[in-house]
Amino acid sequence: MVFIGREREIGWMRLYLEHEANKILAVTGKANCGKTALMQEVMKRLGATHTFFYLDLRLLDVSAPEDFVKVLLYLLRLARREQNFIRRLFNGSKFEFSVMGFKVSRDVKFEDVLQELYLALIEELKKVKTPVIVVDELQSLRELYYNGGKKLIDSVLEFFISITKHQHLAHVIVLTSDSTFYAELYSKSGMHERMKFYLLDELDRAEAMELICYYCEEYEVDIKPERIYRYTGGNPALIETVVSEAARLGFRKAVELKKGYLKDYIATYAEEKKLELKELEKLRKEEGQAWVDANVLFYNVETAEFEFQHRMMELAWNELLGES
């Protein structure tokens, strides 16, 4: 996907990273609004002055706490040291480790494994210039527990707080598309002293129009940009989808197919969860939360209001509401 606009956001991020590490930066925004693309552009532009360690938890299989050990080893660039490092920690008899997985025996505490790897990571961070750890989709760790009930996400956040606020050793940026998870962090006691929260909006109208014009030229589509914007708003991924499909099917059919898919999805989810379609402002909190879980709505922590994930979702919802 081409990167257009976001100069204001990049400038803010550049200024933030030029200051001493002090807080975790938590970034969220509506689905496909460009969080990852923004971060990748920042890493490209600041690569000469900062050392970025990027982890995309969507691509790394972290379905159990033990999998996170592999993530830390990857982050540490211990590809040639992995087995020797683990053997040294556990004397070679209390664990099993291979490229397919990691298993710690009952007489070794998992938190001790984490602690040793955290310490190793600190030593690695001291060797590079202006380190920045970026974790995409941090909420993937949300439901993982170890040692009979400890939350892995709490251990990870404590480590991040240590290297930012306490040691000022490295910047940490966490990205999440889960507005519920973001809201939990936002409202957690004391977290505002340890984290800085950043809500990434969709592209503004001028940037969206520029992106629409780019894709229209790229896909050789002759449609007035204003007409496309009416259905996509400033959502970058939706803009590309609509324009590319318009090149294949024609604009009207592309819009109707996308909207029809969304209407079917909303109607099916409402039936399964026994939810009633209502005007947005009339939704009770638990109803709105159910639609957030379905990725239909987004919870804006700054306004404490529910919003549609994008313009096409809103159009599909309103059409269903009118038909009911």
Image (cartoon, rainbow, N blue to C red):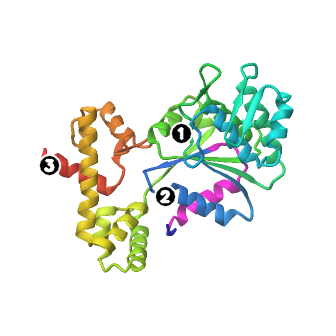
> Badge 2 is on which residue?
34
Q: Position of residue 283 (x, y in %)?
A: 26, 36
Which residue is at a point 23% across and 43% down the rendered structure image?
267
The kind of residue tagged 2 is: Gly
Residues at discs 3 and 1 in contact (Cβ within 8 Å): no
Query: Tag 3, which secondary structure?
Result: helix
In the image: residue 213, left or right of residue 60: left
Residue 287 appears in which quarter of the rendering? top left
Question: Is residue 104 covered in magenta?
Answer: no
Q: Which of the two residues, 207 or 290, is positioned nearer the viewer here?
A: 290
Query: Tag 1, which secondary structure?
Result: helix
Question: Is residue 23 covered in magenta?
Answer: yes
Which residue is at a point 53% across and 35% down the rendered structure image?
185
The circle drawn on residue 139 is 1
In the image: residue 99, left or right of residue 223: right
Which residue is at a point 33% across and 74% down the rendered structure image?
247
Q: Residues within 10 Å of mark 3 (few under 14, many from 20)?
A: few
Q: Which residues are magenta?
A: 5-24
From this view, report whether residue 260 is shown above or below residue 147.
below
From this view, report whether residue 229 is shown above or below residue 135.
below
Q: Position of residue 311 (x, y in %)?
A: 31, 57
The kind of residue tagged 3 is: Gly
* Lower position in the chain sequence, tag 1 or tag 2: 2
Residue 170 at least partly seen: no
Q: Residues within 10 Å of mark 2 (few under 14, many from 20)?
A: many
Of tags 1 and 2, which is closer to the observer? 1
Q: State the CA–CA distance, disc 3 to disc 1.
A: 35 Å
Q: Which of the two residues, 157 or 93, is positioned nearer the viewer here?
A: 93
> Badge 3 is on which residue?
322
Q: State the CA–CA distance, disc 1 to disc 2.
A: 17 Å
